[in-house]
Amino acid sequence: MINRKVKWVLWGVMLILLTFYPKLVGPYFTNVFVHFAIFALYAVSFNLLLGYTGLFSFGHAMYFGAGGFATALALIHINGCSLLVALFMGFFASVILAMVLCPIVSRVSGTAFAMLHLAFSMLIYTLALKLRKITNGEDGVSGFPIPALNIPGVVSFDMRDSTNFYYFVVVVIGISLWLLWSFTKTPFGQLMVSIRDNAKRVAYMGFKVPQTKAMIYAISAGFAGIAGAVLALFQDVIAPDFALGPGTSFQVILITMVGGMGSFFGPIWGSAIFTLLQEFTSRYIKEVELLMGVILIVVMLYFPKGFAGVLALIGSKVFGQLPRKTTAEDG
Amino acid sequence: MDPITAMYVSQGVHGLAYGMVLFLVASGLTLIFGMMGVLNMAHAAFFMLSAYFAYQITVSTGSFWLALLLGPIATGILGVLVERFLLRKIHSMGHVAELIVTTGVMFVILGAVKFIWGTEFLYVSPPPILNWSANIGGMVYPVYRLFVMVLTTIVLGLMALIIFKTRLGMVVRAAVSNAAMVNALGINVPILFMFVFGAGSFLAGVAGVTIAPVLSVFPGLADQMGMDAFIVVVVGGFGSLGGAFLVAMTIGLLSSFGVQFLSQLAPVLTFAFMAIVLAIKPMGFFGERE
Amino acid sequence: MIILETKGLYHDFKGLKVLFDVNLEVKEGERHAIIGPNGAGKTTLFNAITGTYMPSKGRVFFKGKDVTGSQPEQLVRQGIGRSFQITSTFSKLTAFQNIRIGILSKRGVRFNMFRYVDDMKDITQETDELLRRINLYDARDVPAGILSYGQQRSLEISMALATDPDLVMLDEPSAGMSKEETHYAVELIRKLTEGKTIVIIEHDMDVVFSLADRITVLHQGTILASGLPNEIRENQAVKDAYLGEMEE
C-alpha cells in the first residue's frame, strides 16, 4: 500500500512506542492496553472464520472461555504448573473442543453453521453455569496462582506486576497475531478466501473442502483460546458471564464489524475502538444493549467494511489510486 | 377427578396452551425464514415488545381487547418498517449480514424496552369477561388459558386458510420455493417481502399480547421464547408445519412438567437437543445448501 | 485407449428419471461432443461423472479405473477438469488468483502454511503464462466478477485447464456468446487442449462440427446415436428428433 521504507519506519516507531508505553502512561492505561490486545487476538481469530472463510461462528466465546477456564483450572489443579504450560493448556483445550465440533462443522456453512454455533455455545455456557463443582458456576474460578515467568537460571519475572505482564502480553499476542497474519499469506490463505467466494468450485479445483475448513476452524479456535488464557492470567478470575456467554460472543461480532471484517487489521482497530469506548462511556451509559444494537445496524448499513474500510477509502484518496490489494480486502 | 390427576391435567393444559403460543411464534419465524431465508434474530424481541404494548395499552385505556387489536398491528407495522428500511439493502450482502442486522434490531428493542419500562415484572390482567376459573369435571381451570388456545387456533386457522386457499397465499408459497422466479413473473418481490416480514411479526405480536396475562411481562421473555421458537423451527423443519406443531406441543408439555421435575437440567437438555439435531441434520432443516 | 466410459448409467431425482442406461465411450485424445435438446440430461450426465451426484445406478470408469461416485476433488487429482455452464469463478478474487489456485492444486501445494504464496515465483510465473495464453494477462489484477462476460467464460474454461487435466469436460463453453466470441473461444479451446481429451456439451452446431471428432446425441436421458460427425448428420433418428435444429 504505502512505500516499503515508510512501512519499516512506521513499524519501527510503533515498536519504540510499544516498548516505552508503560512508562509513558502508567499502570492504569497499561492494563487498558492489555485488555485491548486480548480482544484484538480474540477478534482476529474470529475473523479468520468470518472475513476470510465466510463462516459465521456465532458463538466463538466458547473457545475464548474454554481457553480461559482451562488455564485457570490447570493453575489450580496442577501443582507447580508453569506459566507457559498454563497458557498452552488454554490453547490445547480450545483446539480439542474445536475437534469435537469439526466433523459436523466442516460440512455446513451459512445460516446452519451460525445456528449450530449458537446452540453449542449456549450449551457450553449453560453447562459451565451448572457444573458448579468444576467451574464454580456464576462466580467462576478465581484466586488461582499466577506463576512467574521463569527463564531458568537467568531471571524471573513476577507476572503480577502490570508492566511485566504487559511485556509478556505484547510478546505472546504479538507472536500470535504475526502467526495468524503469515497464515493468511500462505497458499492456505488463498484456499480460505476461495472457499469464502465459491466453496463448490474449490472442490473442482482439486481441494478437499471439509478438511480445509476443519484446519482453519481448529486454528481459529486455538488462538481464541490463547486470548482467553491471557485474559484469565490478566484478571486472575474467569467466569462464564464475561468469557463464555452469549454476551462475549456478541461482543466479538461487534468488534469485528466495527473494525472491518474485510481486512486482517480490521478487528484490531475494532478492539481499539471498543476498548476506548468502554473506558470512556461505561460510567455514563447504562443502555449498553441499545448502543450495541444501533452500532451493529449502522455499521452494517453504512460502513460494511468497518473502520478499516473507512481508512482504506481515505488512504486511497490521499495516496491516489494504487494497485488493489486483493486477498481479503474486498470485504 | 382426584387432586393429583387434576394437577396433571391442569399442567397438561398449561403446557398445551404455551405450546400453541409457541407454535404461533414459530410459525411467524418459519414464514419469514422460509420465504426470505432470513433467520430473524429479533423475532422473539417483537414478541416481547408486543407484550409490553399489551401492558401499556391495558394500563392506559383499561381495555385488554384494544391491546389485542392494536398490539399485533403495531408489531406488524414495525416488521414492515424493519424490512423496508433496514433489511432491504442488506439482502444482497448475504445471510450473515441479515443475521447481524436482525441481531442489532434485537438489541435495540431489548434496550428500548428496559429504558422505557424498566426491568421489573409487569402484570397484565386478563379482561374481566375471561378473568375467572371454570369448574370442568371437578377441575378448576382459568378460563383465560382456554381462551388463549382458542384464539391461537383461530389465528393459525386463518393463516392456513390464507396460505393455502388464496391467491396471495399461492404467491407466498411459490416464493418460498423460488423467489427469483416469482420476481420474473412480475410480482413485486420487495413488497411481498415487506408483507411477509410484517405478517410474521404480526403473528409474534398476537402471541405476545395473548400470553402477557399468563407469563407477565419482563425483559427475559425474549430469551425464553426465542430459544424455544428456534428449537421448534430447527427441529420441526421449515417445510413441515406439522412437525413444528408436534415439537411446539412437546416443548410446551415438557416445560410445563419439566419445570417441576427437571428445572436444573432443562436448559442444558434443550440446547443439547438442538445442538444434536443441527449436527445430524443441518441440511434437512435448513433446506438449501449455502 | 478409452479414457472415459460409463456403463449402464442411470440417474433419478426423487422419482424423476433423468438418465437411462447411458453407455458413453470416450477415446483418449479425441474431441467428443455431447449434444441434445434442453432437458436431455447432458449436464446431469456431467454431474454424475464428475462426482456432483452419486449415480442411481451404473458405473463410471476413468483411465480404466472405477471412479463411480468419487468426490470431485479426487477426480480432479486423478486428471479430470471441468468447466460449468453457469460461470462459476471466484468473483471477488482477481483473475490471477483464480488461475493460481488451479496451479497450486496441480503442484500439490495444498496445506502449505509455511511459505508466503506471493513469494512462490514459479507458481506466479506459471500462472502468468496461462493468463497470457488466454489473453487475460492485462486483466490479471481485475476481480473476476468485473470482467466482461467473454473474459469470464475464458477464465471459466482455463480454470478447468489450470490443473493440467488429461480429460477436460466443458459444459456449454460458448453459452451466451456472440458469433465472434464463440469463434475466439473455439480457437482458444483448440489451442489449450492440444494433446488432451475433451468432452464438450454444446448447442451451437458450428462449434460442434468444427471441433468434434466424435459426437454423442443424448435425447430424453438416453443415447440416441454416437459416431462420426457425418454419420450423425445423416442419421434419421437424430434428424427426426430435432427437425431443423441441425441447421443452426
Image: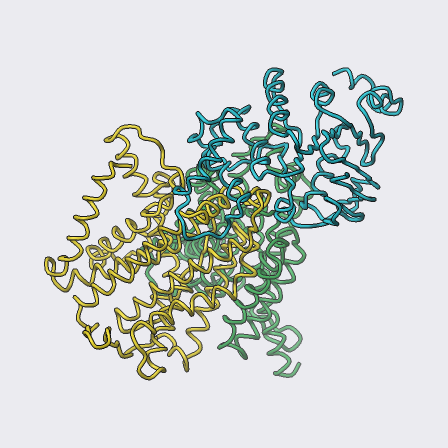
- Of C208 and A269, nearer the camera is C208
Colour scheme in the image? by chain
Q: Position of residue A159 (x, y in %)?
A: 21, 72
Residue nearest the observer in this picture, B136 or A284: A284
Tell me the quarter of the picture where residue A241 sits. Answer: bottom left
Give how far across and how far down residue B149 sits, in percent. Answer: 60, 61
* Frontmost residue, A92 versus B251: A92
- Looking at the figure, which quarter contains the N terminus of chain B? bottom right
Residue B219 visible = no
Looking at this view, is C154 or C66 the one in front?
C66
**Left or right side of C63 for C154:** left
Extreme residue in the right direction: C236
The number of numbered badges drawn on the structure is 0
Q: What colour do you see for chain A? A: yellow
Is B72 located above or below residue A64 in the figure? above
Q: Colour of chain B?
A: green
Left or right: B219, with A1 as reference point: right
The image quadrant of residue A281 is bottom left
Say whether residue A171 is left or right of residue A254: left
The structure residue drawn at horizontal position 26% and vertical position 57%, both measured from the top left corner, is A36
Q: Which chain is cyan?
A: C
Q: Is residue C63 visible?
A: yes
